[in-house]
Amino acid sequence: MPDLTMGVTELVIEARDLDASERFYSDVLGLPVVGRWEGDAFRGREAVWMQSGDRTRIGLWRPQVGIAGSRGGVHVHFAMTVAEADYDAVVARIRSHGEYVDEVYFGDDPTAAGQRSAYVTDPDGHVVELWTRDVATQGAAGPPHATGPAVAGVDG
């Protein structure tokens, strides 16, 4: 069976002190800061985004309940990239196995390329995101919006 993913897109970890964590990842590990979640749109979900290589971001989040109810002691969720053309088939495949999928889009246009994400919880409770965004070539995604009812951590 072929691999349906294109790689790891994000790893999100909790950071009780965002400034100290940013200094560690930036100064100690040499990762560039590529974005920040701040301001009214992200109140309570402040974060710093670091780039690792050409395809992976490391998100530093304050301890919180994340999108789709993701919550961990060490991480919030992790994301893998899926091709835009394959997104619907990937979501259908997950659902065909009886798994519940939360879906969101980012920014203001739900039809824009690279904006769709599906969230599924693995058997150990880790939330896995399947995202159509290519963080190597696409800029900031904007705040998340639920595509259906009651996606935890997202305003409808």
Image: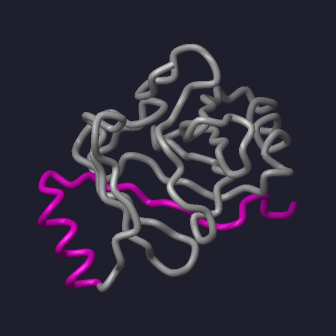
Q: Quadrant of the N terminus?
A: bottom right
Residue at 25% x, 34% y is 44
Which image quarter: residue 22? bottom left
Magenta region: 1-29
Which image quarter: residue 106? top right
Q: Where residue 104 sits: x, y (%)?
A: 60, 33
Q: Where residue 3 sits: x, y (%)?
A: 78, 63
Residue 111 vertical position relative to residue 50 in the rendered view, above or below:
above
Q: Is residue 16 magenta?
A: yes
Residue at 28% x, 84% y is 29
Residue 155 vertical position relative to residue 38 in the rendered view, above or below:
above
Q: Is residue 124 left or right of residue 138?
A: left
Q: Is residue 140 magenta?
A: no
Residue at 75% x, 30% y is 95
Q: Where residue 25 sits: x, y (%)?
A: 26, 75
Residue 130 vertical position relative to residue 153 in the rendered view, above or below:
below
